[in-house]
């Protein structure tokens, strides 16, 4: 009854209007959009960082390989998202441009936190400006800064936190519990990939398929973004370890 009262009074129609109990309802709706998005998992490992995502291929006529849930921001930084992916594309392209500008201006690579703050500043601006709507997307942004793996999560409000492991999207509650029990910072990337695949299998159940999986990593050794191949993912899922490309 309480949410309906808010709607009747119009507090959810303007992003700049607080409800009587101190909430920005449009921002909360944006967070609900993220929770309905496809699942994305990020983990900091002893030898790098890894993303494993569900591409959620809903149409059998779609070429699964054409869907990319993980994007390269710079050689040493990558990003993935859950929610409205067109919103994510705009933010990631902004991050890519920012990284290129930094390289040209300073002849050095940008650090991960600078990318995160730039994205979050824009997200926050869209929560206090009339005529705009919040970005309906959460981003996981990971990078290697001076051999130190970093993983950040941003939400539609523009807030961000650094994590050792994080998950966003529809499978968040269940996978977060699995990560709390099974994740540790000494996991190598291949073991982290296996853990993420097991978690997605448990959450997706009969809908799970290796064709739905997109995975990428950046090792601390060379700070280079790379994608896992379908063969790598399949071998890891079946327990047949393949050497991680270095």
Image: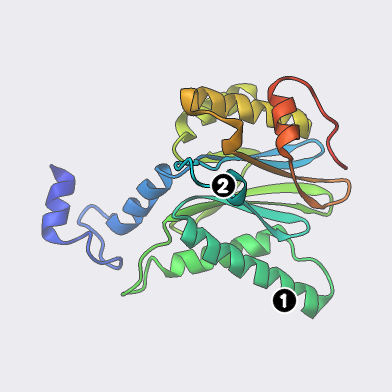
Do the numbered discs 2 and 1 sit on residues whose CB atoms are within 8 Å? no
Q: Earlier in the sequence, mark 2 or mark 1?
A: 2
Q: Position of residue 137 (x, y in %)?
A: 46, 54
Vertical order, 157 against 36 (above or below) = below
Q: Position of residue 227 (x, y in %)?
A: 73, 46
Q: Quadrant of the N terminus?
A: top left
Vertical order, 105 against 236 (above or below) = below
Residue at x 11%, y 56% (from the top left corner): 8
* Secondary element at image label 2: loop
Residue with the mark numbered 2? 63
Left or right: 95, with 85 as reference point:
right
Q: Residue furthest top?
A: 239
Q: Position of residue 206 (x, y in %)?
A: 47, 23
Between the residue at mark 2 and the residue at mark 1, the CA separation in whole angstroms equals 34 Å
Residue at x 48%, y 23% (from the top left corner): 205
Q: Position of residue 156 (x, y in %)?
A: 44, 56
Task: Determine if residue 187 is in view.
Answer: no
Residue with the mark numbered 1? 101
Vertical order, 29 against 169 (above or below) = below
Vertical order, 23 against 36 (above or below) = below
Q: Quadrant of the C terminus?
A: top right
Residue at x 55%, y 25% (from the top left corner): 201
Sort mark 1 into few (<14), some (14-19) or many (20+) by Cα contacts within 10 Å: some
Mark 2 vs mark 1, foreground winner is: 2
* Residue closer to the observer: 14 or 41: 41
Which disc, if any, is residue 205? none
């Amino acid at each position: 009854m309480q949410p309906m009262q808010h709607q009747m009074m119009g507090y959810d129609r303007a992003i700049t209007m607080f409800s009587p109990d101190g909430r920005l309802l449009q921002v909360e709706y944006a967070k609900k959009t993220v929770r309905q998005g496809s699942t994305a998992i990020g983990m900091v490992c002893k030898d790098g960082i890894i993303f494993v995502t569900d591409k959620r291929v809903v149409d059998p006529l779609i070429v699964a390989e054409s869907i990319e849930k993980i994007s390269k921001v710079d050689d040493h930084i990558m990003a993935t998202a859950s929610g409205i992916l067109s919103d994510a594309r705009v933010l990631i392209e902004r991050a890519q441009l920012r990284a290129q500008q930094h390289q040209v201006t300073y002849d050095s690579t940008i650090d991960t936190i600078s990318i995160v703050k730039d994205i979050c500043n824009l997200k926050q601006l869209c929560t206090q400006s009339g005529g705009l709507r919040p970005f309906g997307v959460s981003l996981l942004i990971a990078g290697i800064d001076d051999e130190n793996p970093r993983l950040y999560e941003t939400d539609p409000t523009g807030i961000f936190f650094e994590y050792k492991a994080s998950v966003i999207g529809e499978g968040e509650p269940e996978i977060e519990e699995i990560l709390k029990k099974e994740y540790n910072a000494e996991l190598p990337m291949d073991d982290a990939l296996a853990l993420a695949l097991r978690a997605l299998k448990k959450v997706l159940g009969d809908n799970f398929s290796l064709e739905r999986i997109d995975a990428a990593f950046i090792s601390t050794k060379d700070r280079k973004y790379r994608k896992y191949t379908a063969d790598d993912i399949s071998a890891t899922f079946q327990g047949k370890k393949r050497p991680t490309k270095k």
